[in-house]
Amino acid sequence: MGLEATSPTNSSFLRKHPALSYFLLTFAISWSAAFLVAAPKLFEHGPLPKLTGILMFPAMLLGPSFAGIFLTRRLDGREGLKNLFARMRRVNFPLRWYRALLIPPVMVLSVLFLLKTFVSPVYAPNRFWIGVSFGLLAGFLEEIGWTGFAYPKLRQRFAVLPAAAIVGVLWGLWHAPVIDFLGAASPHGKALPLFFAAFIATMAAMRVLIAWF
């Protein structure tokens, strides 16, 4: 009886604030999953092992993928879910858009090269090529929510740039549990706050590129 009484209110909140609902649900699921992975090591002395940090990230992917699918089904029904899956299968784009995918890695490698040359050799790229396959899987699962649900909902209220920037900033913040395991020179020590701020700015810029694509 109690569930029936609160259901209309919950549904009303979801429909009035679909993007906010997505962010709240995504953060709750992802950060909870990351905590469960890290929990056994939290009571040991010293920093979290590198392997723990690596395992936290795939657990966090449950958030955006589940939230995107669940909220699409809840708010847009079966047709909305069908449309979401149809968009996920689209691969027939002009070649210039596939070439545009080279922009982010070229920019990242350029920055690392400059840092290695003028700051410290610790910034040299590690050439972890198998990580590309990890990134493809992670990107696919993440974008079910960020691009498939959150961005279209924000576009109903905001122009392209503000909508992309909002998603980008929150996308960056979403990485907080694993932020000290990211980058070419981790852990970051005293530089962690500056690294995190730069990371969020990079994610916002990346999201603008994604929205443009």
Image (cartoon, grey):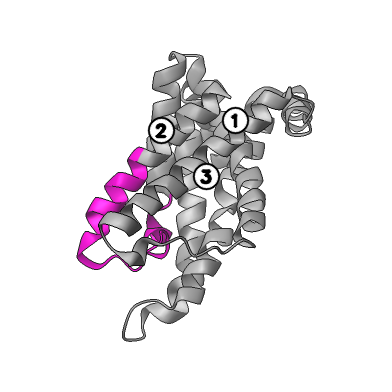
Q: Is residue 60 found inside the magenta-colored segment of the image?
A: no
Residue marked by disc 2: 205
The residue sitting at 79% across, 33% down in the picture is 89
Query: Predominant secondary structure in magenta?
Result: helix
The residue sitting at 42% across, 19% down in the picture is 161
The answer to which of 3 and 69 lies nearer the viewer is 69
The answer to which of 24 and 83 lies nearer the viewer is 83
What amino acid does circle 2 point to? Ala
Quote the CA–CA distance across marks 1 and 3. Answer: 10 Å
Cβ–Cβ under 8 Å for marks 1 and 3: no
The answer to which of 96 and 29 lies nearer the viewer is 96
Q: Residues within 10 Å of mark 3 (few under 14, many from 20)?
A: few
Q: Earlier in the sequence, mark 1 or mark 2?
A: 1
First to last magenta residue range: 175-201
Q: Residue furthest front?
A: 117
Quote the CA–CA distance across marks 1 and 2. Answer: 14 Å
Q: Is residue 60 above or below residue 9?
A: below
Q: Position of residue 10 (x, y in %)?
A: 51, 32
Q: Which mark is residue 126?
A: none
Residue marked by disc 3: 105
- Secondary structure of the residue carrying tag 3 is helix
What amino acid does circle 3 point to? Pro
Where residue 66 sits, quadrant-wise, is top right
Q: Which mark is residue 100?
A: 1
